[in-house]
Image (spheres, grey):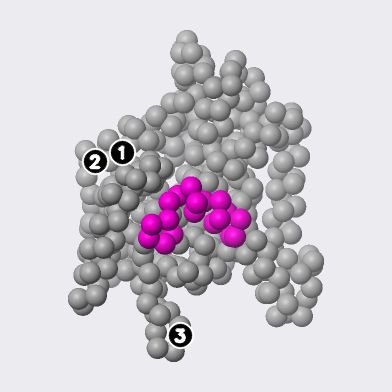
């Protein structure tokens, strides 16, 4: 199974291929304003159907095999390859945005499609990379986040979200009953502001002012400005606007997934006022095989929060973790319809809380 998965992770690059495939559909005579919506149709209709058809995989590597998996260079190469693919795709799609014969509906479809694709390719892979030791992978993760103008995620996610997850202090953890439309604007604003605050605090501990060349937020801001300038020179003012629009869609997609990953889950406050240690009980888990391959096992999010440095190929399934009834594409759609989301997920939260109370 692990050898098959090693090849199966190449499916992650099917998502960016959806954009040029839409361009090919236009070349074949499909109406442009319709063809540009194909990536969304694939990701949110065809993919969930295939996900349920193929089913789940709850297998775990044994301890020795997991150690070997973590050391294999193939898995690292795959995630690093996402950086050049994302940059090339972004420049290509920005120029296409200005050149394709698109009406308002078509332009909206192209922006939304690229934004979701960037959310999958740039932010999801960046999430894997920024957790790793050394300089190369976190650096590549930061560049990927610059491609969607959401570079604060690199700081806030590591020093904010992972510290405060499943507590009221974390803007990326949705309380039971909160709907996604209230959650997303708050989390985007708070997380961006908190990234600047956390970096200022880090520099203060070093005896340095917040406005210093070692401020990571300033460095990534400059990288984003440079990328914006290059896109402007390559694709004009339309390409520049496209860059910021697709980035906003990617960031919103990320925050909706954050909503799905932690909705209604809580860490208990201990007698000393601190919260219990984060474990595999504080994130929703999903074992749908196809979407896990395409997302580098992001859906094994429960283990990720328990062991954040563990590489995606070795993430484990725990039966005790709260389980989602579908993969992330299906759950994202469900979250966009709050009454339906609450009808499906709130009883699962109640059942999980009751089970934990009885332990």
Q: Residue 121: x and y, percent?
A: 49, 44
Q: Secondary structure at mark 2?
A: helix
Can you tell which mark lies on residue 52? 2
Of residue 207 and residue 245, the one placed in the foreground of this image is 245
Q: Residue 358: x and y, percent?
A: 20, 76
Q: Report the mark closest to the observer, 2 or 3.
A: 3
Magenta stretch in the rendered image = 174-191
Q: Residue 39: x and y, percent?
A: 44, 30
Within 10 Å of disc 3 (Cα), the crowding (few <14, some 14-19, many 20+) is few
Q: Secondary structure at mark 3?
A: loop
User: What secondary structure is the stretch in magenta mostly built from?
Assistant: helix
Can you tell which mark lies on residue 48? 1
Location of the C terminus by quadrant is: bottom left
Question: Residue at left 56%, top 32%?
Answer: 111
C-alpha separation, residue under disc 3 versus residue under disc 1: 42 Å
Q: Residue 328: x and y, percent?
A: 36, 47
Contact, mark 2 vs mark 1 (Cβ under 8 Å): yes
Residue 150 against residue 44 in the figure, above or below = below
C-alpha separation, residue under disc 2 versus residue under disc 1: 6 Å
Residue 229 against residue 186 in the figure, above or below = above
Of mark 2 and mark 3, the one earlier in the sequence is 2
Of mark 3 and mark 1, the one earlier in the sequence is 1
Question: Residue at left 74%, top 28%?
Answer: 236
Would you say 55 lies left or right of 226 here? left
Would you say 107 lies left or right of 234 here? left
Question: Residue at left 74%, top 59%?
Answer: 218
Can you tell which mark lies on residue 273? 3
Of residue 186 and residue 158, the one placed in the foreground of this image is 186
Whether residue 250 is visible: yes
């Amino acid at each position: 199974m692990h050898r098959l998965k090693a090849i199966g992770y190449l499916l992650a690059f099917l998502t960016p291929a959806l954009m040029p495939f839409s361009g090919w559909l236009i070349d074949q005579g499909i109406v442009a304003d319709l063809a540009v919506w194909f990536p969304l149709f694939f990701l949110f209709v065809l993919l969930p159907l295939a996900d349920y058809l193929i089913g789940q995989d709850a297998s775990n590597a044994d301890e020795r095999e997991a150690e070997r998996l973590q050391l294999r260079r193939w898995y690292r190469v795959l995630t690093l390859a996402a950086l050049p693919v994302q940059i090339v795709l972004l420049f290509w799609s920005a120029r296409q945005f200005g050149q394709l014969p698109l009406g308002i509906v078509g332009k909206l479809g192209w922006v939304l499609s690229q934004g979701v694709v960037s959310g999958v390719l740039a932010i999801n892979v960046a999430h894997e990379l920024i957790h790793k030791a050394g300089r190369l992978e976190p650096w590549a993760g930061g560049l990927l986040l610059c491609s969607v103008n959401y570079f604060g995620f690199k700081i806030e996610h590591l020093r904010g979200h992972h510290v405060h997850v499943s507590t009221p202090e974390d803007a990326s953890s949705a309380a039971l009953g909160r709907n996604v439309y209230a959650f997303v604007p708050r989390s985007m604003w708070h997380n961006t502001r908190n990234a600047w605050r956390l970096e200022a605090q880090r520099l203060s501990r070093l005896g340095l002012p917040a406005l210093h060349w070692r401020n990571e937020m300033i460095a990534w801001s400059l990288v984003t400005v440079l990328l914006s300038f290059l896109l402007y020179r390559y694709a004009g003012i339309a390409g520049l606007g496209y860059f910021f629009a697709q980035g906003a869609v990617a960031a919103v997609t990320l925050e909706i997934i954050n909503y799905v990953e932690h909705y209604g889950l809580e860490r208990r406050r201990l007698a000393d006022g601190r919260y219990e240690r984060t474990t595999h009980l504080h994130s929703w888990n999903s074992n749908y095989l196809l979407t896990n391959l395409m997302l580098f096992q992001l859906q094994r999010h429960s283990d990720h929060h328990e062991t954040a440095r563990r590489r995606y190929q070795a993430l484990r399934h725990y039966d005790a973790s709260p389980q989602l009834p579908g993969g992330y594409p299906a759950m994202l759609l469900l979250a966009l319809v709050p009454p339906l989301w609450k009808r499906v997920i709130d009883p699962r939260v109640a059942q999980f809380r009751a089970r934990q109370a009885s332990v």
